[in-house]
Image (cartoon, rainbow, N blue to C red):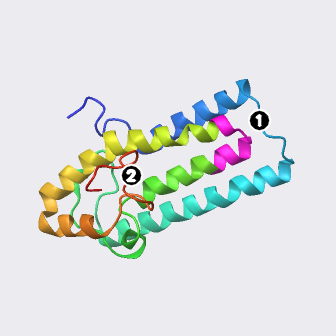
C-alpha cells in the first residue's frame, strides 16, 4: 500500500488538476475560439460529468451505503444498477468530464493533455485500493461485477487500468 492510497479526496485531486490546467493555460498558447463557443464546449462535458456524479450519488444514497471515497471498506452494499451497469466509477468519470470541460473552456491543448494524469493517479491511488477493499468485503459478487463492467468507459488499456480492470 502506497502512502498516497486513498489519502487525498478525489474532488481535491480534481481541483488540484484543474488549478494546474489553469496555470498551464496562462503560460502556453491557447486556441483562438469565441467565448460563446468555449463556454458551450466546456459546458457540455462538464454538464454530463455533473449529471453522472449526481446519478451515482443518488444510487449510493438509495442503497444506504457510504459515499466516502476515503473509507471503501465501509461500504455496506454493492451498487451495480443504473449508471453502475456501464462504469464501475461514474463519480470519477464525472470528475474527468468536468476536467475535460474545463480544458475546453480554457481553449488550452496543454490543459487537456493533463487529464490523463488525473486518470493515472485515480487508478493507482484511489481505484486500486477501493477495488481491493470491495473484493475483501463482497468477494465473488464484486469479482463477477468487475468482470462484466469496465472501470472507465473505454477499453482496458494498461495506460488507464490494470489488466483485469
In the picture of the structure, the residue carrying the numbered disc 1 is 30
Q: Quadrant of the C terminus?
A: bottom left
Pick whichever, 24 or 156, lies toward us: 156
Give the spatial CA distance, label 2 vs label 1. 29 Å
Identify the residue at image location x=23%, y=67%: 77
Image location (x, y in percent) of residue 148:
29, 70
In this rendering, position of residue 110 left or right of residue 14: right
In the picture of the structure, the residue carrying the numbered disc 2 is 157
Image location (x, y in percent) of residue 82:
40, 75
Image location (x, y in percent) of residue 40:
76, 57
Identify the residue at image location x=84%, y=53%: 36
Farthest residue toward the bottom? 81
Farthest residue toward the top? 27
Q: Do the residues under discs 2 and 1 have CB atoms within 8 angstroms?
A: no
Q: How many marks?
A: 2
Identify the residue at image location x=25%, y=66%: 147
Q: Secondary structure at mark 2?
A: loop
**Tag on residue 84?**
none
Pick whichever, 76 or 89, lies toward us: 89
Query: What segment carries the magenta color?
Result: 101-110
Amino acid at each position: 500500500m502506497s502512502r498516497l492510497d486513498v489519502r487525498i479526496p478525489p474532488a481535491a485531486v480534481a481541483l488540484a488538476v484543474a488549478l494546474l490546467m489553469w496555470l498551464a493555460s496562462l503560460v502556453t498558447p491557447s486556441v483562438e475560439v469565441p467565448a460563446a463557443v468555449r463556454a458551450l464546449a466546456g459546458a457540455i462535458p462538464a454538464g454530463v460529468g455533473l449529471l453522472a456524479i449526481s446519478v451515482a450519488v443518488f444510487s449510493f444514497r438509495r442503497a444506504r451505503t457510504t459515499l466516502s471515497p476515503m473509507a471503501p471498506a465501509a461500504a455496506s452494499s454493492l451498487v451495480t444498477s443504473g449508471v453502475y451497469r456501464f462504469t464501475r466509477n461514474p463519480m470519477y468519470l464525472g470528475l474527468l468530464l468536468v476536467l475535460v470541460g474545463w480544458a475546453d473552456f480554457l481553449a488550452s491543448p496543454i490543459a487537456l493533455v493533463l487529464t490523463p494524469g488525473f486518470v493515472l493517479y485515480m487508478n493507482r491511488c484511489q481505484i486500486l485500493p477501493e477495488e481491493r477493499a470491495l473484493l475483501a468485503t463482497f468477494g465473488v459478487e464484486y469479482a463477477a461485477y468487475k468482470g462484466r463492467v469496465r472501470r472507465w468507459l473505454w477499453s482496458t488499456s494498461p495506460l488507464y487500468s490494470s489488466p483485469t480492470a
